[in-house]
Image: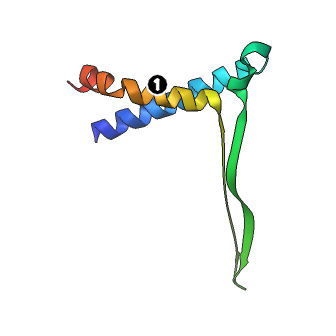
Amino acid sequence: MKQFLLMFAVLVASVIIGSLLGEFARGISSIAWLGKIFEVGISTFDINLKIFVLTLGFQIRICVAEIIMIIIGLLFYPKLKTAVLG
């Protein structure tokens, strides 16, 4: 369980730091490609069941800096796990 929580924390921290770096990079022309956003998903649709209406959809927005930070986080995870969990 501790390993899962550590991995989750590393991934969340990677996404947050990558998002901040991507926002910062958009303002600088030489590294603006780090802020390029990709969107993947399914637009919302309704299922009308007479009693209630169910609306479903799925959308992910991720930038290049987030992808890079996730890869870096996953590469450093084994060393971090050894240092934190022993």
Residue 40: percent from left, percent from top = 67, 50
Q: Give whichever of 72, 1 is nearer the camera.
A: 72
Q: Nearer the viewer, residue 9 or 19?
A: 19
Residue at screen point 48% across, 30% down: 71
Q: Quadrant of the N terminus?
A: top left
Q: Is residue 15 above or below residue 58?
A: above
Residue 62 in the image: state x and y as whole percent.
64, 38
Classed neighbour count for the residue bearing mark 1: other residues with Cα under 10 Å, few (<14), some (14–19), many (≥20): some
Q: Quadrant of residue 10?
A: top left
Dot 1 corresponds to which residue?
72
Q: Amino acid at mark 1?
A: Ile
Give the total of numbered labels: 1
Instruction: List x then y, in percent, for residue 6.
Output: 36, 32
Q: Quadrant of the C terminus?
A: top left
Q: Residue at x 38, y 23 (%)?
A: 76
Rendered image quadrant of residue 35: top right
